[in-house]
């Protein structure tokens, strides 16, 4: 019998703690294989510093339910690119020495694309040195860009927040007779899943998304302005959702051309984005003379747990529990992913995917889901994304405030 250690890494989501609750619950349920359940604070950096805490208190009634509705990363996070095991063995010797000290036999990392690189390298090292530590990844990212898995926990809730933001902004825009353009900026560096989800705002009662701009389509200023102008002439107000990572035909971020993108890259080489909504707003006002405003959701789209998708919460929790099951079966170097069985009715199953085929691979929106003019999505995308944003979890409130899990250490 070995102990269990779980960490969270990368950017948080509204349901990342549902996955954490699933791992904790799975550890308690498999007491035939697992001993104590530990959490590492602030990702792999916290493990390096031996910031390891007991999570046994979550056996108390109601605490796991509170954890499931708590946004952001309960254990804290970090963005650290691990060295290659062949080039820096000392780093891994230190980490695995700490795991041995705490008698850890099961190691879980909840995270996105870069975090799966951590899982891959940890798993590789364990195999190379013959360690009995089983390393398993748990998927998480609002970007929905993990390879192989049909979708990723975190996306459904962020998509729900964006689509409802669009619908409510549309109602606000209709107050005045003056033609106007509302541009909502969504996260998405290289994949436009979130911006595309704004199209879910449309139904038989209203059209709350007229234009989407995706990183998968080279941004053409003239084509964009022409599209906005045509919609404005037909209906007055225009609702636009743009992904932060749109680029021109030469692969340059739109903000680069406008002289806005000047910030340094992060540890993984990613440029710090933001401001594209304002850039497009200025383009519209300057060239079309229309009243325009931009709205940047920023971190709200990844932490709005009071508007989470029940589908997302349920699946995130299930992925965490299944990760423990895989570990107890000795399946290291895998990630519990989702395999879709049908769209209508929506059915899926959780299956193990090889982390080597997920780490450092980005899944973008296929061309079949993008409209022919590049400024919208097809019915295929709507059928794919709609069930992921559905359902309302029963949340615990007090005096109008959503309640969060208290610190247990």
Image: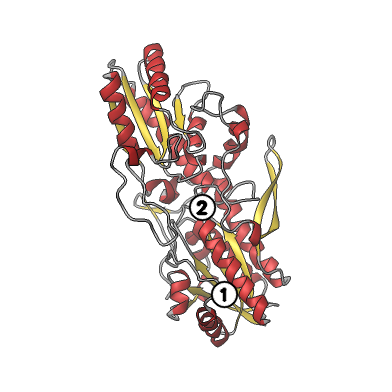
Q: CA distance from mark 1 to mark 2?
A: 25 Å
- 84 or 382, nearer to the observer: 84
- 241 or 117, nearer to the observer: 117
Q: Is residue 332 above or below residue 274?
A: below
Lateral position of residue 63 relative to residue 329, left or right = left
Circle 2: is it few (<14), some (14-19), or many (20+) Cα within 10 Å? Answer: many
Disc 2 element: loop
Judged from this view, the residue extending furthest toward the front is 250
Determine the residue positioned at 54% across, 83% down.
Answer: 93
Which of disc 2 and disc 1 is earlier in sequence? 1
Q: Is residue 365 above or below residue 62?
A: above
Quadrant of the image occupied by residue 337: bottom right
Lateral position of residue 40 relative to residue 351, left or right = left
Q: Find residue 21 and name its label.
A: none
Quadrant of the image occupied by residue 99: bottom right
Residue 353 rendering spot, x and y as whole percentages: 68, 58
Q: Is residue 336 above or below residue 290?
A: below
Asked whether the viewer can see residue 165, the reply is yes
Judged from this view, the residue extending furthest toward the bottom is 101
Instruction: Write down the residue under mark 1.
Output: 85
Lateral position of residue 400 relative to residue 332, left or right = left
Disc 1 element: loop
Asked whether the viewer can see residue 28, the reply is no
Mark 1 vs mark 2, foreground winner is: 1
Q: Find residue 141 and name its label.
A: 2
Residue 226 rendering spot, x and y as whole percentages: 40, 19
Residue 8 rendering spot, x and y as whole percentages: 49, 65
Circle 1: is it few (<14), some (14-19), or many (20+) Cα within 10 Å? Answer: some
Q: Are marks 1 and 2 in contact (CB under 8 Å)?
A: no
Quadrant of the image occupied by residue 223: top left
């Amino acid at each position: 019998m070995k102990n269990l250690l779980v960490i969270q890494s990368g950017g948080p989501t509204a349901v990342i703690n549902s996955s954490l609750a699933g791992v904790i619950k799975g550890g308690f349920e498999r007491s035939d294989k697992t001993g104590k359940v530990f959490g590492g604070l602030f990702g792999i950096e916290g493990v390096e510093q031996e910031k390891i805490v007991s999570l046994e208190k979550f056996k108390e009634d109601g605490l796991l339910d509170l954890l499931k509705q708590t946004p952001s990363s309960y254990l804290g996070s970090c963005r650290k690119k691990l060295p290659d095991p062949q080039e820096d063995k000392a780093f891994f010797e230190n980490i695995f020495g700490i795991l041995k000290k705490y008698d850890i036999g099961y190691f879980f990392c909840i995270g996105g694309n870069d975090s799966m690189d951590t899982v891959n390298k940890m798993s590789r090292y364990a195999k190379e040195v013959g360690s009995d530590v089983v390393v398993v990844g748990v998927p998480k990212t609002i970007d929905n860009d993990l390879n192989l898995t049909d979708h990723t926990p975190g996306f459904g809730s962020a998509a729900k927040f964006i689509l409802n933001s669009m619908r409510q902004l549309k109602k606000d825009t209709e107050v005045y007779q003056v033609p106007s353009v509302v541009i909502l900026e969504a996260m998405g560096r290289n994949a436009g899943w979130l911006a595309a989800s704004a199209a879910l705002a449309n139904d038989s009662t209203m059209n709350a998304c007229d234009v989407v701009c995706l990183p998968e389509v080279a941004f053409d200023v003239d084509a964009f302005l022409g599209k906005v102008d045509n919609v404005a002439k037909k209906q007055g107000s225009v609702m636009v959702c743009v992904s932060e990572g749109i680029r021109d035909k030469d692969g340059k971020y739109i903000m680069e051309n406008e002289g806005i993108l000047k910030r340094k890259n992060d540890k993984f080489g990613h440029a710090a984005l933001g401001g594209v909504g304002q850039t497009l707003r200025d383009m519209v006002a300057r060239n079309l003379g229309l009243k325009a405003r931009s709205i940047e959701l920023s971190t709200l789209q990844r932490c709005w747990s009071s508007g989470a998708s029940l589908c997302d919460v349920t699946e995130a929790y299930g992925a965490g529990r299944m990760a423990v099951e895989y570990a107890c079966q000795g399946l290291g170097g895998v990630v519990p992913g989702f395999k879709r069985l049908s769209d209508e009715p929506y059915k899926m199953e959780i299956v193990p995917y090889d982390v080597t085929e997920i780490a450092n691979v980005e899944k973008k929106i296929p061309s079949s889901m993008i409209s022919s003019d590049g400024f919208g999505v097809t019915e295929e995308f709507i059928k794919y994304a709609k069930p992921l944003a559905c359902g309302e979890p029963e949340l615990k409130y007090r005096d109008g405030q959503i309640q969060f899990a208290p610190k247990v250490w």
